[in-house]
Image (tube, rainbow, N blue to C red):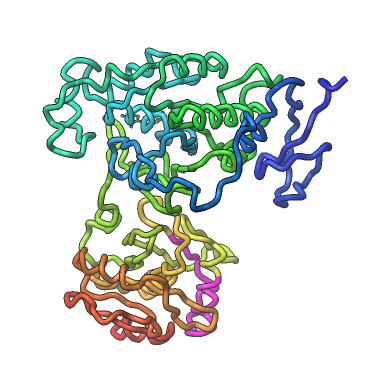
Amino acid sequence: MASAKTLWYCTNCGNESPKWMGRCPACGEWNTMVEAPVEKKGSKGGAKAVASGSKGERKPLRLKEIDRSKEPRLQLGMPELDRLLGGGIVPGSLVLIGGEPGIGKSTLSLQIPLVSGLKTLYVTGEESARQVKMRADRLCGGAVGESVSGAFCRNGLRSSAEETDSPAAPVEDTLIFTETRMESILEQAEEIRPELMIVDSVQTMFTDTVESTPGSVSQIKEVAAMLLRFAKESGIPVLLIGHITKDGYIAGPKILEHIVDVVLQFEGENRGAYRILRSIKNRFGSTSEIAVFEMTGAGLREVANPSEMLIPMHEAGLSGAAICATLDGTRPLLFEVQALVSSAVYGTAQRSATGFDTRRLNMLLAVLEKRAGFHLSAKDVFLNMAGGLKVSDPAADLAVVAAVLSSNFDYSLPGDSCFAGEVGLSGEIRPVANTDRRIGEAARLGFKRIYVSSFTPLGEQQPKEIKIVKVADVPALVKALFKNA
Ligand code: TYD
Ligand code: MG
């Protein structure tokens, strides 16, 4: 009997296996295999059918035969989000928005039709129609349908001023559909033919062609494949929402990442005001771009200039803080790195880093110990990146070192200085990519001094308002910063 057969899937990478294994042979993660029944006979073969083109009528084309005309993109009415997508959403694309529960996925996706005015089918399997309505009222700062445009603009959800007196048309074009069965959703979508479809969330949807319960790996794979097929055939872009659990074990967006065209992921603390949306995969634009949003009482507000919000309001004078000039994607981003160095209470010193790799912190501390003679092994070191950011740019090293030393000496760094450099194992300070851009952004924000590697190749034209201080190694940095300490 074929129907009794099951397969095992890795929830981390989607690898299939005929039997359970403690460790996934493909990605090496432990304890990630879950059981899922094989699709019923006669189902359409899921993702494979999409990849090969379901009708078998397509032929290979010569490169020069392919139409190069630029894909028109749909604007979602939120400039930062459009920029993140590479200039709007591409018709027929499937975009996954992932993030932990409560971070703002539903809020963002409901805001899109309200702000853009696109005819949207909003399918939700998580909330009742009334709940969605209440949320929409909240986003509009009043009852939807009554003097909406005015309320919108006051809330700053609309960006451009000229839209201030546009009619309240958008809201009437948002159709809310509380349904979880894919077959009926797609039937409605074919009939309505919206400009945009939103599905909240992939974990609650199910299809009749697969036997397992909603949220299981095989359901998620098949639901995503059906949506991809629908998007490609109809040309309607689909925004799909997916939850990521804290432990990351439940079947989820990891597998989806391979199927969809674009993956946007929310980062940041649920309790903090700022949410960062990062593009992890984008078939139509660059990745590792970010957009920053602020969660307000009336929805998410775009923060066009994140550096300004991440730089501290307090005047210089606190020790343990250093401003770092990083690059996130193509966008320079300046923010505060905070360190606290104190004598260890217990025998072994604690090291903890939020938003920064702890192993990298340990390495930097070892470099400080070995190459510059600071005995930090008996000290607790805590490190924090402002605004809940996660930083992987090596240029943050220099600011981390400066912040740690500043806290260690209890000597504050001048508030008008910032740092961009990688620290190597022998204590040398190495140049980082696009230093010119970082310098430009620092100058624009009014910084007076930026510390970079001596080996940085710099362009001829540098802003006059900022002094570029070149340091060769950690001892040179210590000398430059803490002469008086
Ligand atoms: P939500 O979009 O429901 O999260 P997700 O869909 O990712 O699970 O966001 C929920 C949180 O956002 C909730 O804690 C309340 C908060 N929130 C606001 O602060 N302001 C608002 O206008 C809205 C709609 C939600
Ligand atoms: Mg939600």
Where 397 sits versus 62, above or below? below
Residue at the (25%, 75%) spot, across then down: 449
Q: Quadrant of the C terminus?
A: bottom left
Query: Magenta residues, as a range?
Result: 363-383
Residue 247 in view here: no
- Quarter occupied by residue 256: top right
Q: Position of residue 10 (x, y in %)?
A: 71, 41
Q: Position of residue 152 (x, y in %)?
A: 20, 28
Front residue of 87/174: it is 87
- Quarter occupied by residue 410: bottom left
Front residue of 417/79: it is 79
Front residue of 138/191: it is 191
Q: Quadrant of the N terminus?
A: top right
Q: Position of residue 361 (x, y in %)?
A: 51, 67
Q: Left or right: 216 with respect to 121?
A: right
Residue at the (49%, 37%) spot, across then down: 96
Magenta run includes residue 366: yes
Q: Left or right: 31 with respect to 234?
A: right
Where 85 sits versus 430, above or below? above
The picture quadrant for ligand 1 comes to top left
Q: Position of residue 125 (x, y in %)?
A: 50, 19
Q: Left or right: 273 with respect to 143?
A: right
Residue at the (32%, 77%) spot, across then down: 451
Where 31 sits versus 344, above or below? above
Residue at the (30%, 79%) spot, across then down: 459
Magenta run includes residue 133: no
Residue 211 in view here: yes
- Quarter occupied by residue 433: bottom left
